[in-house]
Image (tube, rainbow, N blue to C red):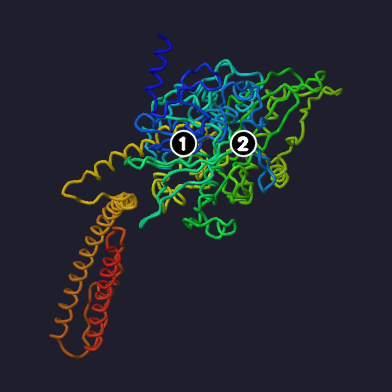
Amino acid sequence: MEKLFLLISCLLMFTHQFCSEAATSNPEYPYSFMTADAQKAASRSYDYIVVGGGTAGCPLAATLSQHYSVLVLERGDSPYGIPDVEDFRGSPTTNPKVAQGFVSEDGVQLVRARVLGGGSAINGGVYSRASTEYIRKIKWDEKLVYESYEWVERLNAFQQYKLSTWNSATKDGLLQAGVLPYNGHTFDHLVGTKISGSIFDENGKRHTAADLLQYANPENIVVLLNATASRILFSLGSGKPKASGVEFRSNNDGLIYQISLNQLSINSEVILSAGSIGSTQLLLLSGIGPKRQLKEMNIPALLDSPFVGKQVQDNPSAAFTIVSSKPLEDSYSQLAGILDNSQNYIESGSLVQRNNGTNTQYLGVLDIKLAFPLSRGDLWLKSVDPRDNPYVRYNYYSHSLDLQRCVKGIKVMVNLSMSSSIQEFAFTDSGNSKTLQFLGIALPKNQSNDDALAKLCKEALGTFNHYHGGCQAGLVVNERYLVKGVDNLRVVDGSIYKDSPGTNPQATTMMLGRRKAPNEILHLALEETEEKNTPDGLPELTEDVKTMKIDQESRIGQLEIILKEIKGNLKNLVDISKEVINNSARGLKKVNVMIADQRAQSTTSIPYSVIKQKKKIQEPNLQGTRLQTTTGPYTRTRSRNQENNTSRFIMDELEDINNRVIQKNSEMK
């Protein structure tokens, strides 16, 4: 009966039947839909092909599988059963099975993930949401964003109620250094000192983005491991190039396969979720990028997209390692000091280093990260082999303001190191004075020399590996993350970010995969269904027309707001104009009466008093104040010519005012 039940379960899977993977007894392949069999995976078509099973790709694929057939192409293997990944004491960034190191053209050592789960499988584990200001600046739907955060947090986020010795001391030290207020345990991004969330549970086990595949519909998804995408396939017609599939190389058999989107589906896309490096690299390999760079690599240019690979960015950091005089335990980062104004984040961790099994050192680390650097760089191809790392230059601290902000942060770090909580780990010399011992670059005691601190920022330059950009929203992709200039191609990962969200971006990137892009895809699917079923034989709207329609609707909404403001200003201007004209008409009438009275008298010089004759008419204040005048009665004799000159002068002044009002009205319109 058990065998019969298993057979029936297999028959209910995909028509190509992954029966060999249906059993989940293999701890490294806990999902029935995980496979390394490229030939079977490539034997059919899919509604969506997600390139990259990383921090965004896994939640994205899980969400899409609720309604569509999905293939995930992941160049790495499973993260399950690997101690370096699962145990918080592991060193995943130095394990070539799950990580690929590279050195930027700036000389900084970095690493990129090569495993299902992406960066969430090799990072420091901090889980912290983006700030409300960040979300509003990007104009994301706040309700959907927070619902998606909660969806992720049900499986992958944990509060840390027990702090390590070093993290506890750092928390107290931050408060003593003035990083206030204390915000306690929270996933939210709040200025001050807080206990962050973590993807490590209470037992120290890591929960990667791959865990979010638990949400997937197993009948609608295949996760193909050890498959490196080499280029995106396009169909060329009379319109824009249209993504039709993906070419990839199996790392197991070394063969190249081509897999297609479901041509019968009204909803089909290739979605890049390979990260800032991988997604940008794949666009270039597919002929989408700066035309001159493509020509240099002998890649036929499908689309001259000048911003692909531009505006890449990495947040510079500076780490300072203190040799502790007291025993410490291994611990990952558990807290964050979010500095106000200086735009820096401080984190900490500790480790036990055993040298040759005899000498043990206890090390406490204080790390500072520049939150929103202004320096940006470029990414370009080194070769046409997708397995090679491309060239990347981040231009750290090339913008002078970045160094100024770093200096401000270092000053807080100095205060932190001088706090009584951190000084508890100092060594006492023979003179009974305490001194912190640093391993490598030391924090200075004197923070008055900004030039010396700026030099220190450059000397201690490091990275959190929070690099982003390359397919930036607004430049390479539109607001719905569709690649500009082609159809059926989207990017959903950190490459679309202009700035890195929160103290650590993984929470927001997992959220992005769950809700932001997938939700738009699902809504778009409904729109496309309605448009394809339009009555009376009306033609369906193409993707570029729909995008144009949305852009136009957005612009119309903005214009309506501007027009409303103009109408309000115009009404005030009209009221002022009426007042000016009425006052001027009354003044002219009085002057004409006085002139007529004078003409009725003798043509010789006759003294008389002209009240308000010395009236100087000022230009109207267009901000709504009343017309101001100056008056001064005086008596003098005038000839008829003088009277006529006065009348003409007043008329000229009135005409000049009237012309200015007309001009202002015209400008407002």
Between 200 and 487, the residue placed more toward the observer is 487
Which residue is depicted at the point 51% across and 25% down? 183
In the rendered image, the quadrant that contains the C terminus is: bottom left
Residue located beneath label 2 in the image = 464
Q: Is residue 91 above or below residue 304?
A: above
**Which is in the foreground here, disc 1 or disc 2?**
1
Badge 2: residue crowd in 10 Å (few <14, some 14–19, many ≥20): some
| 114 on left or right of 65 | right
Q: Distance between the residues labelled 1 and 2?
A: 37 Å
Q: Is residue 157 above or below residue 626?
A: above
Between 313 and 185, the residue placed more toward the observer is 313
Residue 559: where, in percent of width, then height? 29, 54
Q: How many labels does the image show?
A: 2
Residue located beneath label 1 in the image = 42
Residue 142: where, in percent of width, then height? 38, 35
Badge 1: residue crowd in 10 Å (few <14, some 14–19, many ≥20): some
Kind of residue sitting beneath label 2: Phe
- Determine if residue 625 is in view: yes
